[in-house]
Amino acid sequence: MRRLRHLLPTAGLTLGLTATLLVGSGGVAAAQTWTHTDATGDVLDLTLSDHDVVGAAPAPDRAEGDVHTVVVKHTRGKVKVRTAMRALPAARGWVTVGHIVTPHGRYEARAIFLVEGGRSLFLVRKPGRKESLARCSGLRGVFDRTGGTVSLRVPRSCLGNPRWVRVNVSVYDWNGDFSTYADDAMDPAGWEQQVLSPKLRRG
């Protein structure tokens, strides 16, 4: 099954989680907006062995990290992604991962939130199976614990100013060295298929 080495912390090291996603594409003035409603009660408890997923069990009563709405806006200058959950995770570390597909390739916008250590933001380019950090000084990500939301902004220039983008959002809530909770916001049956949004052209 899919490995979580790049999303989850290695045992004994500082947390290394990842976060929210967004993307942009070409068009005119306002924003093209797409809203997706995810089923609730579809969080999975993933069992890990050396960062490989070796099992998955439903955790329908878990509200933390359970996505219910994703709103993506593709504007003239940036892609905005707002992910709303029943409750934000309260674990030592958690991440919302934005899988972004453009005509130029694949990206991930990762926002890592740590109870101790603050927030880290990364934009990763994924050509094939390899990945590399992309420089993106305008990347922004914030969370609102009261409202249960994570908001991310990715400048279109960081994505090569694509004509369109397609997006998938996943939330990972680290539960220790051998387990993590996960919710794929667009795939009610699993977590690793990375079902994508329709093409969103720049508004």
Image (tube, rainbow, N blue to C red):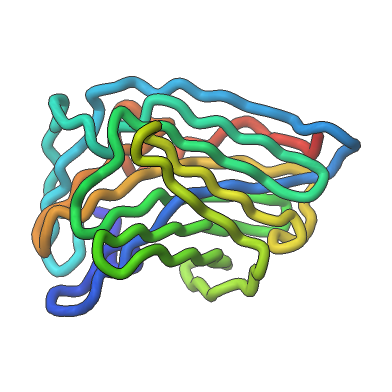
Q: Residue 31, can we see it? A: yes
Residue, x 76% and y 40% (percent of image)? 75
Q: Nearer the viewer, residue 76 or 163?
A: 76
Q: Nearer the viewer, residue 129 or 180?
A: 180
x, y (%) of residue 25? 77, 45
Residue, x 52% and y 57% (percent of image)? 109
Q: Is residue 198 above or below residue 144?
A: above
Residue farthest to the front, as pictured: 146
x, y (%) of residue 134? 61, 72
On the rendered image, what quadrant is the N terminus found in? Answer: bottom left
The answer to which quarter of the image holds residue 76 is: top right
Q: Is residue 68 left or right of residue 76?
A: left
x, y (%) of residue 61? 13, 26
Residue, x 79% and y 50% (percent of image)? 77
Q: Is residue 122 above or below residue 64?
A: below
- Please state the total of marks drawn on the protein image: 0
Q: Is residue 143 left or right of residue 159?
A: left
Residue farthest to the bottom, as pictured: 13
On the rendered image, what quadrant is the C terminus found in? Answer: top right
x, y (%) of residue 123? 55, 64
Q: Residue 126, can we see it? A: no
Q: Nearer the viewer, residue 194 or 135?
A: 135
Q: Nearer the viewer, residue 55 or 153?
A: 153
Q: Is residue 201 left or right of residue 167?
A: right
